[in-house]
Amino acid sequence: MLAQALQTDPDTPMRASVPLSPALKLAMKNYLAEVAKRLQAMGFTPARLDRVPQQAHGQSAFRVYYMDFAEPDYARVSYECEAPYRITMQINAARLTDPGARDVITAKGYIDLAHELFHAVQHNSAFSRSNCEPPEWITEGQAEAIGQVAWQIKRARQVDGQVTRWGLRRYDQALDVPPGPDAHDQVYQTSSFWRYLAERAPLASPG
């Protein structure tokens, strides 16, 4: 799978405040391609994104929309539950890089790119096809756990340390996060559960 960073989302035409320079475009493209290879090596089904163009050399490429959002999200994946199952990956230009280094992706940026690409993998799974809107402790917790491949690839980790790396949600709380003022943050913190499963799985395999 090859990821390609292209243009502003035509459905949300907002000019990016940070220019998409050739250096930044190449950095995004190469990094997302490496994340995709790692996800395939882990056994995940390929991601599915809308409008997959063919390149001159015959390979396909995902379009990633580089834009400013009306809301302060860092990144997001938008999807539809009915055919043709449109899925788009959108990156907030204003939050991907540091103001003083516009061609350099931040640690948070690397984590978010991997996180959002995994949402596209999730939406191409059989589980997602039969559960259009599963609980966020599943979707966001899994994606947050996968986002930590940024450390393996780029040694990129946020400065808030253990909470970001392990998602320190109290283990006496239910995984299904109840509605409330802190619910949005807590669904991401369930990443520790998914990391635990991934680390235990090889130990439980036969032989």
Image (tube, helix red, strand yellow):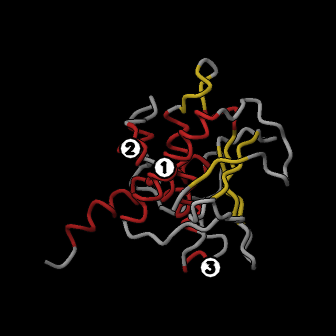
Residue type of the residue flagged with mark 3: Arg
| Point 61% across, 40% down: residue | 25
Nearest to viewer (mark 3 / mark 2): 2
Residue at the extreme front of the image, as rendered: 57
Name the residue nearer the viewer: 30 or 127.
30
Instruction: Identify residue for label 1.
Output: 189
- Mark 2 Cα shell of 10 Å, populated few (<14), some (14-19), many (≥20): few
- Residue 102 versus residue 118: which sits nearer the camera? 102
* Left or right of 159 in this view: 126: right
Q: Nearer the viewer, residue 40 or 175?
A: 40
Residue 24 in picture, x, y percent from top left: 59, 35
Q: Earlier in the sequence, mark 1 or mark 2?
A: 2
Quarter of the figure with residue 195: bottom left
Q: How far is mark 1 from mark 3, CA to CA?
A: 25 Å
Q: Residue 12 at x, y = what percent?
A: 84, 49
Q: Dot 1: what SS? A: helix
Q: Which residue is mark 2?
A: 153
Tell me if 10 is positioned left or right of 48 in this view.
right
In the figure, is residue 27 to the left or right of 152? right
Disc 3: which residue: 129
Mark closer to the chain start, 3 or 2: 3
Q: Is residue 188 above or below residue 82?
A: above
Circle nearer the viewer, 1 or 3: 3
How far across and down, in percent of the image, does residue 76 sit?
66, 51
For marks 1 and 3 on the same chain, the one whose residue lies earlier in the sequence: 3
Tell me the amino acid under the disc marked 2: Ile
